[in-house]
Image (tube, rainbow, N blue to C red):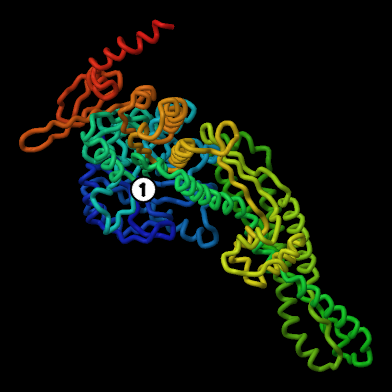
Amino acid sequence: MKKIDFHIHTISTDKDESFEFSIENLEKYVSLRRIDAIAVTNHNVFDIIQFNEIQDKINAKVFPGIEIDVEKGHILVICSHDKFGIERIRLLSENIKDKLLDTKYISLEILIKLCSNPLEYLFIPHIEGKPKSLSLEVIREFPEGYIYCGEVPNQSKFNLLKRGKNIALTPVLFSDSRICNHMLIEHFSLRQIYLNIEALELDTIKAALKDRSKVYLDIEGTDLFDATGEGDFIYPGINVITGKRSTGKTVFLKKINSANENVKYIRQFELVQNQDDEDKSIEEFQKEVKLDEQKFIENHLNQFKDMASTVALIDLQINHNSLDKYIDSLLKFANDTKKKNSYAKTKLFNEEKFVKLPDSSLKSSIEAIITLIENMKKDVTLKKYLSEVNFDELLKELVSNFRKEKYNNKIREYVNETLDSVQPVLQSKSDSPTISNYDQLLHMKNLLTVHTFNKLVKSMKESKIISLTNIGNFSIRVTRNAIDSAATLKKKIKKPSKVTHIFELYDKPYDYLIKMSNEGLANDVGIEKAFFDFQYDVLNKYGNPVSGGERSEFRLMRALKDAYSYQMLLIDEPESSFDNMFLREEINKTIKEMSEHLPVVIVTHNHTVGLSIKPDYIFHLIREDKPDGSEYYIFSGCPDAANLSDKKGKIIKNYTALMNSFESGEKAYEERKVDIYDVVKNRG
């Protein structure tokens, strides 16, 4: 088994938060995590001098690579660790550097052209929810032989893809670490994979990555993973931690939290609101809901805000004045024929300049066709389906049109330059009035934009439920309304201001917007929020506002939904705040669904959570008090195992551990069963 991490950053680029690379910390990371091979994959850049230094100093195989911004996500490109592979990555870096001068990303066609022989490279796209993921549709655009594995965001996604049959890609999990000088050892990533190989050569690694049965999260091949960096392995699904009070369960949970990145940690009693003061409880809840409302509104009005900001820059009065001035100058020019000397009668005296044409898309089309023609020479599938198209003639016609377009633009530029030099001379030699400049196209465009804006605002003022989101048995309903009065508008404004005269223009959106802007209130209230009022309601399953204990239940469901944006979920004793029916019917179902997307670790004493949830892995913690102090043990294993074991091989009976954790021991359980459950059951 060989342990690898093929996603490491050593250069701070505009894609990263600023950091200073530390080769000493890279040495420590590789040594502490016992990594056999790494790849240096910086964003769109490869520094051969730095790479050679790393390769000389690190006690592991170091592969050259680069993380490239392609048009719909990120992809790692890695080569062999010999001089030929290093040179390929260096050349690739230089080529994409030139391409990125004109655009923010590299097209798939260009990338395939630059890496025309897939045998020389290892391609690993981001997939399955990792930031900047490539969709399966985009991955299928690559020719056969390019993509057969993908980098996932966490262990649960790894496990889901490895077991799944719908996706052919082999999952891989890497640190994506920025190795900086202030990095602490306890923050070294735990995201690496094991490959069942002997030789650390690119061809061997690629062959293993084509076979998902040779890729693992742990050296034993069980797909458990080290959650603390100290050999405490958990399952990439649901893990339940049990034990008596003061056995170190919360300490264990905190250790997992500190050893991993991007963790959602729901602490004990965190979601319970003030039970002694109902008014304070309501106030706290309303503050939280208000924050959620503000985030929703900002996101909902984001595009409208951009449009309103653009419209606010339009000054129709200036356009109207320019038109009036143009007409006046035109009439004056026509009437003052006596003042027209030979200079004024020339064609160039009042000639208007050409308007600059928008940039053409022909250049990118030509590049795409060239790439397609080259790929057809190597790809049988492309040739099969596209052989009937005469791409050579198409390319000739596109090039011809591009040249004509370029020639016409040059002519326009030359004419405008000529007018700039000739007109002032002609006009200085005549008393004849000149015709004022007037951009009719811009004026019409502004009128159309304002008209569209007014129409849009009018339609958006109609009362409408714009969002209805279900969170378990709860729902969040958001209604958008028109602002009903100047008093409502005044409440939105932070500083004291008179708004009645502004609100009088509310039914004229453009005039209202300009008035708000001119009086400095648009930024104060938020240019987009000045037009609409929102009602944000949290409702129970009956459609009524939540109350009492429902507020805490909603907060937990909301926290769980929020956890989808994290890489791991930790929950400390949820039963401390909620009844068993809610835990069983709502929480267990939600957590079960979540465990397919991220690892979940729950501390509990409650069998409704601990057993009914059907965990994938369980822990039982024990404290033994001795004269010289307490000793703590962490036992773990599968729920159906006869025994649980600790890191030193010590064993306890699983059945005894479960009884002690959930039933206060076997004796107490039998007493309750005979004296209570069976008696009540028999009466029925």
Q: Position of residue 268 (x, y in %)?
A: 34, 39
Q: Quadrant of the C terminus?
A: top left
Q: Name the side, left or right, on which 123 lies relative to 214.
A: right
| Left or right: where 528 falls relative to 352 | left
Near mark 1 (Cα within 10 A), the count class, few <14, some 14-19 or many ≥20, is some
The answer to whether 665 appears left or right of 467 in the picture is: left
Q: Residue 113: in sight, yes or no? A: no
Q: Nearer the viewer, residue 461 or 161?
A: 461
Find residue 377 and report its horizontal and vertical position in percent: 56, 41
Secondary structure of the residue carrying tag 1 is loop
Q: Which residue is mark 1?
A: 176
Vertical arrangement, residue 95 with respect to residue 319, above or below: above
The total number of labels drawn is 1
Q: Quadrant of residue 172?
A: top left
The quadrant where residue 649 appears: top left
Residue 21 or 643: which is nearer the viewer? 643
Query: Which residue occupies the extreme left position in the image?
Result: 627
- Give the vertical position of 399 relative to 316 (above or below): above
Name the one closer to the observer, 513 or 313. Answer: 513
Q: Quadrant of residue 48?
A: bottom left
**Residue at image coords 55%, 41%:** 538
**Residue 448 point in image, percent of width and height:** 78, 61
Q: Quadrant of the N terminus?
A: top left
Give me the residue at 85% from left, 81% from top. 347
Q: Is residue 155 visible?
A: yes
Tell me the amino acid under the disc marked 1.
Answer: Asp
Left or right: 123 as drawn, with respect to 530: left
Indicate whether 164 appears above or below 327.
above
Residue for point 65% across, 45% down: 479
